[in-house]
Amino acid sequence: MAPRSLPVQRPRRALVMPSILTALLATAGLLLPEQPQLQQQICEQHINPEACRVW
């Protein structure tokens, strides 16, 4: 009978660190505006200009 090979276990850090990095980058991409002036122009086209003066 051949010995069973055990699955290779990777350290937990090797799985957690890329997940944390991905989450941080995704959050930054969603929260940081790319072009605030462009967003202001779009807002003013569709909504009252006074309502767009939040920044």
Image (spheres, rainbow, N blue to C red):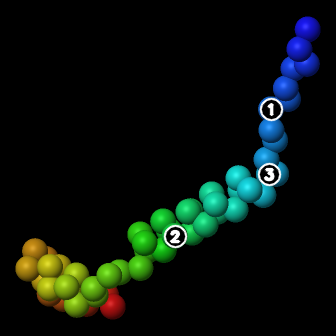
Where 14 falls versus 27 (above or below)? above
Q: Is residue 51 in view?
A: no
Residue under the image location 14 percent in, 85 percent down: 41
Query: Which quadrant is the C terminus positioned in?
Result: bottom left
Q: Earlier in the sequence, mark 1 or mark 2?
A: 1
- Spot the residue most to the top: 1
Q: Earlier in the sequence, mark 3 or mark 2?
A: 3
Mark 1 surroundings within 10 Å by alpha-carbon count, few (fewer than 14), some (14 through 19), many (20 or more):
few
**Amino acid type, mark 3:** Arg
Residue holding disc 1: 7
Residue holding disc 2: 25
Q: Are marks 3 and 1 in contact (CB under 8 Å)?
A: no
Q: Is residue 36 left or right of residue 23?
A: left
Query: Which quadrant is the N terminus positioned in?
Result: top right
Relative image position of residue 48 (x, y in whole percent): 13, 81
CA gap, disc 1 and disc 2? 31 Å
Comparing 25 with 41, the one in front is 25
Relative image position of residue 6 (x, y in whole percent): 85, 29
- Determine the secondary structure under disc 1: loop
Q: Is residue 22 left or right of residue 53?
A: right
Residue under the image location 8 percent in, 79 percent down: 45
Residue holding disc 3: 12
Relative image position of residue 28 (x, y in whole percent): 48, 74
- Determine the secondary structure under disc 2: helix
CA gap, disc 3 and disc 2? 21 Å
Comparing 51 with 17, the one in front is 17
**Amino acid type, mark 2:** Leu
Where 1 falls versus 34 (above or below)? above
Q: Is residue 42 left or right of residue 14?
A: left
Can you tell which mark lies on residue 34? none
Question: Residue 31's image quarter?
Answer: bottom left
